[in-house]
Amino acid sequence: MKRTLFALAMTMAAVVPAKAEDAVCYNCPPQWADWASMLEAINEKLGIAMPHDNKNSGQTLSQLLAEKAAPVADVAYYGVTTGIKAGNEGVVTAYKPAGFDDIPEGLKDPEGKWFAVHYGTLGLFVNVDALGDAPVPQCFADLKKPEYRGMVGYLDPSSAFVGYAGAVAVNLAFGGDLENFDPAISYFKELAENDPIVPKQTSFARVVSGEIPILFDYDFNAYRGKYEEDGNFEFVLPCEGSVRVPYVMSLVAGAPHEEAGRKVLDFILSDEGQAIWTNAYLQPSRPVELPAEVAAKFLPASDYERAVAVDYAHMERAQAGFGERYLNEVK
């Protein structure tokens, strides 16, 4: 019996080789921002295996708070407002990876509790073939038209950061600001009459399949669809304007594999790591120039002039209040 158990154990060890180091990243889904390539590079370059994780930003923070006394994750990735909140809640710890000083002010916590790793611009990810006879929408206002009934999707803005970023973009587009979300609430109330689809998590595959023909999403996902998937996809930067938003990362306080987590963050901010984001049509947080062949695939720079930065700390402070209003008045 002992020999049988020993043989079984040896067989399992041969099938599942032990890694030199492992780490856990919350909210690093392979279909979002091409985390698949980043995780593969981290495994190859550092010998650190990190499993895929399909949480959204809000779910990540909730999990970190629930596990505060006994952390499971080592690093976390989320929208900037959630990163600010995580720093304020004490579930992440200060760490300044190599390259931290190159990140512009305002896009990092001075102590290193969170820092931008890349940018995205909010717009419309459109599966043109799934529109039928309807034209490609060019403006946020277009989405309320009858021809787009049941075609428009946006992530739940009370939970997912990209959903909240979309709400901020819509709010600014129709004359609101971070103190007044009345225009966004009015917009989503009107859009609700057009039977929108409101998932909680990243929905790239649902756009590719045509289930969601139009999704409030970032340019990098739309470009990935346009250039890497079979089908006819477009990124539309709405005529009313939009927002540019950084995504950030943190080292989890009390991380069970802290040293591995530090190495992962060092790699992601390195020249090599930042270059991986550019292959996924992302603007890196450090001033790393986009490869010419990648830059040529973006909309013209003149279109991007309609996308603005905001006070992200103020955006964070307004998030909970908007989420409550959305749940009470729209959902």
Image (tube, helix red, strand yellow):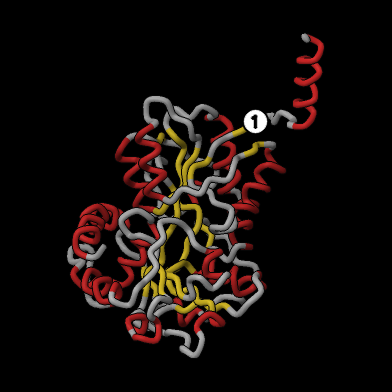
Q: Amino acid at mark 1?
A: Glu
Residue 195 in view of the camera: yes
Task: Between residue 331 and residue 32, name the one nearer to us.
Answer: 331
Seen in the picture, residue 222 relative to 311 is either above or below; the reply is below
Name the quadrant of the N terminus.
top right
Residue at point 30%, 66% (across, down) = 168
Q: Secondary structure at mark 1?
A: strand
Q: Which residue is mark 1?
A: 21
Q: Position of residue 68 (x, y in %)?
A: 37, 30
How many labels, in total? 1
Residue 292 in view of the camera: no
Name the quadrant of the C terminus.
bottom left
Q: Position of residue 139 (x, y in %)?
A: 38, 83
Residue at point 49%, 47% (across, down) = 27
Seen in the picture, residue 179 relative to 259 is either above or below; the reply is below
Q: Residue furthest front?
A: 1
Seen in the picture, residue 56 relative to 292 is either above or below; the reply is above
Instruction: Tell whether 248 sits left or right of 283.
Output: left
Instruction: Tell whether 154 sits left or right of 286.
Output: left
Q: Quadrant of residue 324?
A: bottom left
Residue at point 35%, 35% (across, down) = 65
Near mark 1 (Cα within 10 A), the count class, few <14, some 14-19 or many ≥20, is some
Instruction: Tell whether 12 sits left or right of 106.
Output: right
Task: Between residue 108 and residue 256, name the one nearer to us.
Answer: 256
Q: Position of residue 39 (x, y in %)?
A: 63, 47
Residue at point 49%, 42% (across, down) = 26
